[in-house]
Amino acid sequence: MERNPFVTYALAPTWVMTLALQAEVLKRISPDDEAMVKQADWYLKWCESYTEGEMFARAVQRWDKDMGETPTFWFTSDEAMQRAREISFEDES
């Protein structure tokens, strides 16, 4: 288990969404707490970095298929969402 990145340091899409939501809530309820805002911004940056990965791309493609076009989330960009949609996976060819 210690070598499984999704148990140690990596984020699966559901954790990306959970952490991003928590960070955003913390920023909004503590706008005068500079330390909290700084930490929340760090979390949002971490979440944004995971929008470039395979797991997020697979999630976006599945969400698009199951629920219609996935919105661009506040912690990422339209370009990152488009890249997630354009990735093709060898195991799904």
Image: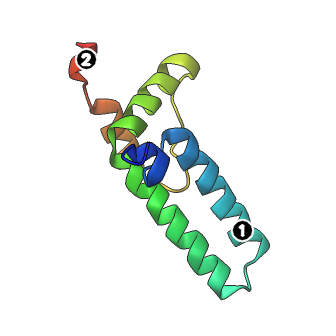
Q: Quadrant of the N terminus?
A: top left
**Whether residue 11 can be seen here:** no
Image quarter (top left, top right, bottom left or bottom right) of the C terminus: top left
Q: Amino acid at mark 1?
A: Leu
Outermost residue toward the right in this view: 29
How many angstroms separate mark 1 from mark 2 (CA)?
39 Å
Q: Report whether 10 appears left or right of 15.
A: left
**What residue did someone put label 2 on?**
91
Q: Residue at x 39, y 36 (%)?
A: 55
User: Quick check: 7 above or below 31?
Assistant: above
* Residue on which the image places disc 1: 26
In front of the other: 61 or 7: 7
What type is the residue that disc 2 sits on? Asp
Q: Position of residue 19 (x, y in %)?
A: 60, 55
Residue 22 as seen in the image, left or right of residue 9: right
Give how far across and how far down residue 37 sits, in percent.
63, 78
